[in-house]
């Protein structure tokens, strides 16, 4: 199919069955052997391949009294067909698992804040509720998770960004707040800070592409250059504790460090910024039993933690 929904001329001829037939002609050395491997008659196989040749306007098979072999054009098409068939097999396997909810391994994706703070609890809850399903998470920044969901590499992702990504289905699971942290001896300790204070400071920041960085970019579009950038919340907290400078992070990531005094949470001079933590998936998977089951367990685990 073309992207505008119109039918492509090759949709009816370059079917997966014909692509497999073409690949098998190369692998097995002839149309007859390829037809037997596909469970069709040789005349049917020959007609299907001739139909593709007619639509393409070039010969794919070199036909002789001793048998058939692929032309250079046929070899080029067979090489591309292998890639298409591999992707099609992966799609078929995923569709089978999604529609039937069959046991197996499912790979999901989560942003780093979610992955570090919430995913361990979710995995325990999923193991208790869906023991037939082995779930793993790839943890990266929010941009990477969104790209994986768009590409169909994972059926479900979890991000915390200022606004849900366009073109994907989403559900806001909870909101988290941004907090300001500083070294214990910093001049901000003991007084509220506002956006002007933060804009003038050299903050320790997350890398571009992270949900936290996107939120800071939204709240502070014009600010001083970062003191440093890290792709880890833990590394930022440690850098702040070491005196590198203040930072703005999710309240989920501070934890024990604030309680022990390694860093100090500085109060906002106004209401703290909030951002949504979203589950995201492709709209076509809205009715997927797998997506529904995972979201049900995640919702329950979040509700139990409140």
Image: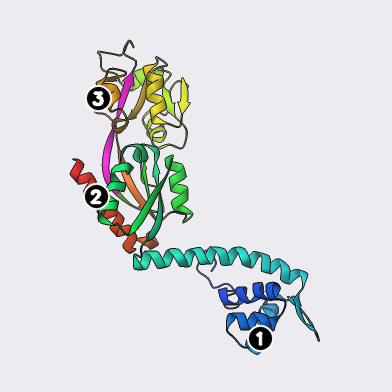
SS class of the residue under badge 1? helix
Q: Which residues are magenta?
A: 172-182
**Residue pictured at 40% horizontal, 57% vertical:** 105
Q: Nearer the viewer, residue 110 or 195?
A: 110
- The location of residue 151, given as percent across then percent down, is 49, 54
Q: Which residue is mark 1?
A: 47
Residue bearing mark 2: 299
> Tag 2's secondary structure?
helix
Q: In which image quadrant can residue 82 be found?
A: bottom right
Left/right of residue 3 with respect to residue 57 in the rendered view = left
On screen, residue 104 above or below 254: below
Residue 76 coordinates in the image, percent (x, y): 71, 66
Magenta stretch secondary structure, dominant? strand
Distance from Cα at disc 2 to Cα at disc 1: 54 Å
Indicate the position of residue 17 as horizontal and vertical percent values: 57, 77
- What residue sits 35% from the left and 37% below the top? 116
Say which element carries label 3: loop
Which comes before the other along the chain, label 2 or label 3? Answer: 3
Q: Position of residue 45 (x, y in %)?
A: 64, 84
Q: Quick one: 294 or 193, which is closer to the camera?
A: 294
Can residue 57 be seen in this snapshot? yes
Q: Which mark is residue 228?
A: none
Residue indicated by mark 3: 270
Examine the rendered structure and indicate whether residue 32 appears above or below residue 260.
below
In the image, residue 107 lies in the stretch drawn in magenta = no
């Amino acid at each position: 199919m073309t992207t505008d929904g119109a039918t492509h001329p090759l949709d009816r001829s370059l079917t997966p069955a014909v692509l497999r037939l073409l690949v098998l002609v190369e692998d097995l050395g002839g149309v007859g052997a390829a037809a037997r491997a596909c469970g069709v008659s040789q005349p049917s196989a020959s007609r299907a391949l001739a139909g593709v040749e007619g639509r393409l306007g070039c010969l794919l098979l070199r036909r002789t009294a001793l048998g058939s072999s692929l032309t250079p054009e046929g070899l080029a098409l067979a090489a591309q067909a292998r890639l298409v068939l591999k992707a099609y097999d992966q799609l078929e396997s995923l569709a089978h698992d999604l529609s039937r909810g069959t046991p197996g391994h499912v790979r999901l994706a989560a942003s780093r804040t979610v992955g570090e703070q919430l995913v361990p609890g979710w995995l325990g809850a999923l193991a208790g509720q869906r023991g037939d399903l082995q779930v793993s998470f790839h943890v990266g920044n929010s941009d990477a998770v969104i790209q994986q969901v768009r590409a169909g590499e994972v059926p479900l992702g979890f991000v915390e960004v200022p606004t849900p990504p366009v073109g994907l289905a989403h559900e806001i699971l909870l909101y988290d707040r941004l907090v300001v942290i500083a070294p214990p001896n910093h001049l901000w300790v003991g007084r509220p800070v506002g956006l002007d204070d933060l804009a003038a400071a050299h903050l320790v920041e997350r890398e571009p592409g992270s949900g936290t960085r996107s939120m800071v970019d939204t709240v502070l579009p014009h600010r001083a250059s970062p003191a440093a950038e890290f792709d880890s919340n833990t590394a930022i907290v440690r850098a702040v504790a070491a005196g590198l400078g203040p930072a703005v992070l999710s309240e989920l990531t501070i934890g024990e460090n604030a309680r022990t005094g390694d860093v100090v949470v500085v109060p906002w001079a106004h209401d703290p910024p909030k951002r949504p933590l979203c589950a995201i998936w492709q709209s076509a998977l809205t009715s997927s039993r797998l997506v529904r089951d995972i979201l049900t367990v995640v919702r329950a685990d979040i509700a139990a933690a409140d």
